[in-house]
């Protein structure tokens, strides 16, 4: 059986460690759940672990979370478009925005629902993704300020998500200055700067992040422990929360190098290349029943360091086991760590089972005093402002 497993004890470990970092800064934070693709058991586990602020980039996933966790604070993390603005105002407590036309529709829908919709105004700081240009910030805010059913909760930015630009201190200092400018210009408090993501955590841990950055949107570091700037794993985090277990469909000793002429006939690139193999060299090869149709094979890393992925088709992946099969046989599983791309494909796909371990009932037995408290970010910011 092929399955992706999410270890809840390891997940709790990462959540607890990141919460310690947030508390020390201090900052509020929202758990980004988009890589879960609405997986009910993991969402329920997050609730049991004390998470009450969750963000997603798919409205369908926000609906799924709402069914499981009726009292959570919801963040819509993809900039709203005109056709989805009505639904965003209905499902999200907070949304990220950069177009005045969309915000006007959000205002109209919020008025119809007799509510106030909170927004983060996104500013372009170099990643060349969403965000208004800094030079138009004052005029933009002035127009938003006129909308009675919109509350500007804060300003924010996305860094390191598209162009690969490494976040730096100067960019966050600019964000802090932009907030000061708006507050002085309009004599109105803007309580939040939502500039933090998993890619910003190295700056936080180095003590270089300005204290004004008081909200983070964290996803990848929670589930995979990834250090997106330096590579590897962030200090103290687990990189084995999520594992793929793939069943061996065939295992045989074979040649490791094709004897005939090769050509680029496969639509997929090989996931690994062992340049030190010589013609005629033999070893054990396992075929697992997971392929490119199921996940991004290039994003898999065998847990056993002796194993190497030789290549994959749409349905099968070949793993070189070495000169010894290590006792593996047909029906056994090979375990792989996953990167973000591989996890995303696995979670959204329908061909590989998703399993949490231990069971949710075991998680419910953990004393409440030992659970985390990832409180709603808006509520916590409000408390900090009143102090």
Image (cartoon, rainbow, N blue to C red):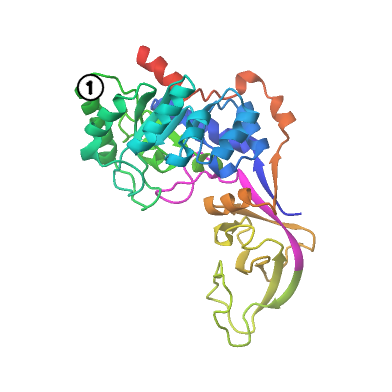
Question: Which stretch is magenta?
Answer: 224-250
Give 190 or 337, whichever is nearer the viewer.
Answer: 190
Which residue is at 57% across, 72% downward? 267
Secondary structure found at label 1: helix
Q: How far across and down, in percent of the image, does residue 33 sit? A: 55, 38
- Asked whether 310 or 275 is in front, the reply is 310
- Taking 61 as reference, is 126 left or right? left
Residue 102 location, x and y as percent?
Answer: 38, 37
User: Does residue 367 sit above or below 265 in this rendering?
Assistant: above
Quarter the N terminus occupies: bottom right
Membership of 230 in magenta stretch: yes
Q: Position of residue 134 (x, y in %)?
A: 24, 39
Estimate the x, y position of residue 66 in percent, counting from the top left.
60, 29
Q: Which residue is mark 1?
A: 186
Along the viewing direction, whichever of 232 and 387 lies nearer the viewer: 387
Q: Which residue is rendered at x = 48% and y = 39% of the image?
A: 84
């Amino acid at each position: 059986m092929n399955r992706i497993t999410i270890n809840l004890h390891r997940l709790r470990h990462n959540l607890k460690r990141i919460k310690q970092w947030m508390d020390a800064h201090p900052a509020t934070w929202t758990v980004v759940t988009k890589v879960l693709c609405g997986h009910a058991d993991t969402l329920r586990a997050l609730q049991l672990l004390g998470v009450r602020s969750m963000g997603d980039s798919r409205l369908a996933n926000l609906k799924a979370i709402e069914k499981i966790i009726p009292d959570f604070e919801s963040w819509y993390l993809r900039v709203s478009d005109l056709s989805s603005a009505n639904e965003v105002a209905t499902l999200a407590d907070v949304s990220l925005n950069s177009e005045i036309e969309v915000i006007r529709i959000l205002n109209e829908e919020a008025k119809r629902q007799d509510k106030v919709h909170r927004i983060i105004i996104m500013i372009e700081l170099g990643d060349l993704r969403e965000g208004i240009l800094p030079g138009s910030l004052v005029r933009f805010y002035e127009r938003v300020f006129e909308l009675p059913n919109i509350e500007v909760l804060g300003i924010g930015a996305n860094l390191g998500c598209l162009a690969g630009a490494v976040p730096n201190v100067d960019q966050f200092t600019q964000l802090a200055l932009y907030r000061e400018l708006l507050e002085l210009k309009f004599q109105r408090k803007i309580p939040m700067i939502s500039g933090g993501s998993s890619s910003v955590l190295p700056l936080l841990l180095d003590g270089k992040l300005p204290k004004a950055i008081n909200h983070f949107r964290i996803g990848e570091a929670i589930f995979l422990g990834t250090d997106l700037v330096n590579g590897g794993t962030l200090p103290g985090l687990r990189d084995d929360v999520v594992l793929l277990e793939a069943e061996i469909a065939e295992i045989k000793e074979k040649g490791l190098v094709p004897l005939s002429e090769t050509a680029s006939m496969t639509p997929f690139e090989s996931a690994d290349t062992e340049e030190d193999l010589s013609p005629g060299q033999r070893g054990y090869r396992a075929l697992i029943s997971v392929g490119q149709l199921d996940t991004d094979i290039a994003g898999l890393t065998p847990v056993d360091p002796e194993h190497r992925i030789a290549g994959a088709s749409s349905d099968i992946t070949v793993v070189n086991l070495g000169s010894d099969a290590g006792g593996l046989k047909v029906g056994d599983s090979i375990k792989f760590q996953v990167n973000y791309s591989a996890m995303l494909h696995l979670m959204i796909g329908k061909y590989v089972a998703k399993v949490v371990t231990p069971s949710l009932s075991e998680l419910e037995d953990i004393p409440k005093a030992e659970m985390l408290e990832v409180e709603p970010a808006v509520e916590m910011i409000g408390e900090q402002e009143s102090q």
